[in-house]
């Protein structure tokens, strides 16, 4: 049994070493270098896009602007946040809105709120705003 484990481990180490040698050889190839550079550039651009979107959302919220438009594109500020149940006092929540392990059933509370408009005792309905940018291109770039 021990010999089998040693053989398997030895085989694994040999394959890992072979893979490492091949990777080193590949790294010397121009195409691999170009691919690596391009991947790095793509990651930087993705990070910049996220930063720019956050910045644009902040500016549009501050200026109370919901849409920007020009000949090439239309940018819409969309609130993708949704309402959720905030538990203020577990003791005040009616029994039908509690689960067996004395945990509030936020789904039932939200359903009740949506159906009746009434806020269940011990809870409050809150909406955490969440925004995204929607860009619609009007002409081909």
Image (cartoon, rainbow, N blue to C red):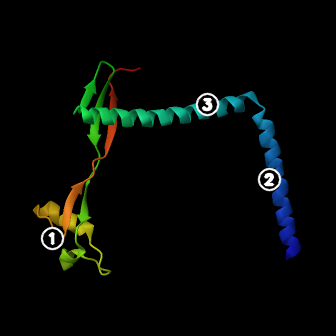
Residue neighbourhood size for the residue with mark 2, other residues' Cα within 10 Å, grouped as few (<14), some (14–19), many (≥20)? few
Say which of 125 and 12 sits in front. Answer: 125
Q: Is 62 displayed left or right of 118 in the figure?
A: right
Residue located beneath label 2 in the image: 16
| Disc 3/disc 1 C-alpha distance (Å) | 56 Å
Residue 12 point in image, percent of width and height: 81, 59
| Residue depicted at 83% across the width and 70% down the height | 5
Image-quadrant location for residue 133: top left
SS class, disc 1: loop
State the mark number for residue 121. Answer: 1
Return the disc, 3 or 2, that comes first in the chain's sequence.
Answer: 2
Residue neighbourhood size for the residue with mark 3, other residues' Cα within 10 Å, grouped as few (<14), some (14–19), many (≥20)? few
Location of residue 126 with respect to 139 vertically, above or below: below
Quadrant placement of the C terminus: top left
Residue 68 point in image, percent of width and height: 27, 26
State the mark number for residue 107. Answer: none
SS class, disc 3: helix
Return the disc, 1 or 2, that comes first in the chain's sequence.
Answer: 2
Residue 111 point in image, percent of width and height: 20, 64
Q: Is 67 displayed left or right of 34 in the figure?
A: left
Q: Which of marks 3 and 1 is in front?
A: 1
Q: Which residue extends farthest bottom?
A: 100
Location of residue 105 with respect to 40 vertically, above or below: below
Residue located beneath label 3 in the image: 38
| Residue depicted at 33% across the width and 40% down the height | 132
């Amino acid at each position: 049994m021990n010999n089998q484990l040693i053989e398997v481990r030895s085989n694994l180490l040999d394959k890992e070493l072979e893979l490492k040698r091949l990777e080193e050889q590949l790294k010397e190839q121009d195409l691999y270098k170009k691919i690596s550079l391009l991947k790095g550039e793509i990651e930087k651009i993705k990070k910049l896009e996220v930063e720019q979107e956050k910045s644009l959302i902040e500016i549009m919220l501050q200026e109370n602007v919901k849409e920007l438009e020009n000949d090439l594109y239309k940018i819409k500020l969309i609130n993708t946040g949704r309402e959720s149940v905030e538990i203020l006092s577990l003791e005040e929540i009616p029994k039908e809105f509690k689960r067996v392990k004395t945990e509030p059933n936020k789904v039932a509370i939200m359903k009740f709120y949506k159906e009746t408009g009434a806020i269940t005792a011990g809870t409050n309905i809150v909406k955490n705003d969440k925004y995204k940018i929607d860009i619609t291109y009007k002409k081909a770039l």
